[in-house]
Image (spheres, grey):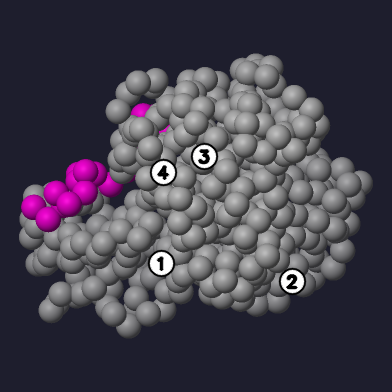
Amino acid sequence: MSRRPARYLNSGSAGSSHSSYHLGNDVDLCIKYWYNVSFFVTMPAAEPVCQEGAWEIGRGRTIGAKQGVRFTPALQNTLDNSEKQNLRYQMMGSNPKCWNGSSSMSHYPFAGAPVSRRQLLKAGAVAGAALAIPHVARAESGKVTAAIGVDLYYATYVMADYKGLFKKRGLDFSYVNFDNGATALDAVMTGSADINSSTLLSMLPRYEKTKSMYATSSIAAAGKLYSVVTKTGTKTVQDLVGKKLGLPVDGIAAYLFRQFATSNNLPQDKIELVNITPPESVAALARGDVDGVLLWEPWPSKVLTLVPDTHRLRNLADDGIYVTNWLYMGQALAGDKSRAGATLDALVEASEFMKANADETISVAAERFKLKPDGARFQYENLDFTMAFDKDKFVKDFDPLSKFALEKGRIKAVPPVEDVVKPEFMAGVHADRAKGW
């Protein structure tokens, strides 16, 4: 099979400029979603041909399944924006060597082989080791880098950037998009980024490895963005008994399932939990591998759109179950009180602007995160963007999540609350938002 160079364009995470990448003729074609960059493909004169395997989207949807499948422009157009942004495009081949010999890769410092999540986590487990992910500038005086996800849980960062609120405080701010907030937190753990927000279930294992990050505020909370979606034959919550429910079994969704089951008096041992990633949810439910899924937006909505005869069985907010993302600062930023305070102050101002300016926030967030406007609006309307660091609220979240993490073997010991927080930063800029410490 002849191999032709394919051209790749960076779709512009964080407002970065577009750059071209070329593969040499002597390598297998490969397209890989990197954790901080969204890729789309423009075709050369002759479209690249899969050597073997298939073009695969997030292991949840496969395009083609045999040698000779052409990834044509028409085929690209079948992908929606969420798939282009969130999921991996990967050529499944026997020896997928990518990006070799590309002189144009010098624009970015991450030239070389694409990085898997396994590689990323392995690298992150070694304190002081160089992280094998696309580099994010280390904190320097006046600089602040955020590692964020790709949904409106992270809208406060992009709105603060959009409104110039960091610049107003003398901060040189940038952000990098990862496919989820938990993966992004690895960049803070290793010192490659300064701030991130995610759940405590994501933070605690990373804190245990390096003791290098601290909770400083809430930044987004929601319940309605988490849903149980099932086939329409499952009419009530009690009908889940004896069924298979798909979710990431060691993440926040597994913890939420426990709360959901307890709230509805469901026998947890009578519902089989099947480990799936969010991108696998559509195919898993369509094939009948599972009878339902428990996930966060945009995945429940994607399932409802793409899988016939499905319905939203339950929003977790119906049971009073909410998920809070906390803002974490890495060691370098936490060691600079004035910079840390200015960072929080900018984000607080952004959060208040967002509450008062729904349409502008939705428009900017949809563009920055490449979401459909109606999807961005749904997320906005079901998120609480209040930034505050009340001790009682934090401890109420910390206690059950830390116990769950310990039970699941994700941490070896529960750290004292006072070791994982820095309330003095919020207290220094908004004392009324840092109560009880």
Q: Nearer the viewer, mark 4 or mark 1?
A: 4
Q: How far is the residue under mark 4 from the one under mark 1?
A: 31 Å
Q: Which residues are magenta?
A: 103-124
Task: Estimate the x, y position of residue 304 in percent, counting from the top left.
Answer: 65, 72
Residue under the point 78% across and 60% down:
315
Q: What residue did someone put label 1 on?
A: 84
Mark toward the viewer: 1 or 3: 3
| 211 horizontally vs 26: left or right | right
The residue at which mark 4 appears reads as 171
Judged by depth in the image, the label closer to the viewer, 2 or 3, is: 3
Q: Which callout, 4 or 2, points to the residue nearer the camera?
A: 4
Q: Amino acid at mark 1?
A: Lys
Which residue is nearer to you in this view: 106 or 284?
A: 106
Residue where numbered disc 2 is placed: 311
Say few, some or many: other residues with alpha carbon within 10 Å of mark 2 (under 14 / 14 to 19 / 20 or more).
many
Question: From the viewer's perspective, is 212 left or right of 426?
Answer: left
Decide whether residue 246 is among the magenta residues: no
- Report if the CB atoms under discs 4 and 3 are less than 8 Å apart: yes
Residue 121 inside the magenta-drawn segment: yes
Callout 3 amino acid: Ala
Report the Cα–Cα distance between label 4 and label 3.
Answer: 8 Å
